[in-house]
Image (spheres, grey):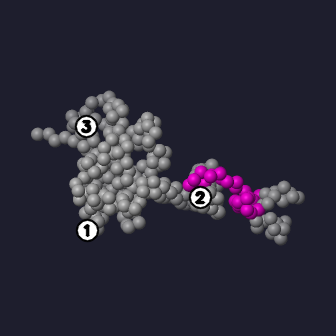
Amino acid sequence: MEHELDLFENAIDSLQHGLAHYMEYEENQEVTDIKQAIMNLVNSIDLMILEKLRRFDEEQIYESEQQDKYGLGYRKTIHVDKAYRKIRDEIDAITTDEFKAYEILKILRNSATHASFTFGSNSKSNIVFLLHYIARFLEDELETEIDEFLSTEEFHFYNQTIKGMSFGEVLQDRIDAAIEAEIDWLNFRSIKDGGTGVVASWPCHECSKVGISVDEDLAPIGECAFCGHKHKVGVCEVCSTEFDPDWDGLVDEETGLELCEYHSDSDNYD
């Protein structure tokens, strides 16, 4: 006798297993439970994305027209990020910011499956985001409600977990964390190669975060990596130090050179 879960049922099964493992983790604090929770919840999202694409056109979810080559009842599907891009092109409900957040989820899942795995109290927002995201996707994209698939106890636990934090807040936290991680990596790479950091030393005038790009690998020069606000970036023609020309530095009247605050002092410039 064969047993089968269709694509949507498989997604719900992963959701239920993921939530069950998270409930176990909250009770027993076993790291293996939280690892399984994250793997199952992200897998649930992946399958829901494929299900959404399948509802547009079932053939689009497959890698090729080749049917079940090895007789295992499996036909190779496209990568989920490719499916997500197809969905994003079809409907307006999935935003660019959500797609960035989805990329973060893949990193979270990959750490559980391909590398060392650490989870602490400060990582709870990852779980909150996963649950918010699944509930929103079910409601907005698959026209159903999360409570239809959870027991009374599970639904109560779900509500207690997400209480007090809106989806938008979690999403923004995840996006900011990804940008900070990218800045850290680019800083490390640049300094290792003998260069300098990739962001200016002063904060953005709009969002107050230290994210004004001085390296095209991060963002266009002068653009805040967090909010996109454009800034002027001065570069001292003596020491190559970047500075905020709205507040510091000047153009020397005699030489026409743009100078930082230090070298704009005649005692420090000859």
Which residue corresponds to the image point at 42% horizontal and 57% vertical from the top-left?
Answer: 166
Tell me the residue that label 1 is attached to: 28
Tell me the residue that label 2 is attached to: 207
Residue 246 left/right relative to 204 = right
Mark closer to the chain start, 3 or 2:
3
Report if residue 95 is visible in the image. Answer: yes
Callout 2 amino acid: Cys
Q: Are marks 1 and 3 in contact (CB under 8 Å)?
A: no
Which residue corresponds to the image point at 35% horizontal and 39% vertical from the top-left?
Answer: 52
Task: Indicate which label's residue lies in the foreground, 3 or 2.
Answer: 2
Mark closer to the chain start, 1 or 2:
1
Tell me the residue that label 3 is attached to: 74
Callout 1 amino acid: Asn
Specify start and end residues of the magenta stretch as a single range.
Answer: 221-249
Q: Are marks 3 and 2 in contact (CB under 8 Å)?
A: no
Callout 3 amino acid: Tyr
Residue 97 lies, in percent from the top left, at 48, 48
Q: Are marks 1 and 2 in contact (CB under 8 Å)?
A: no
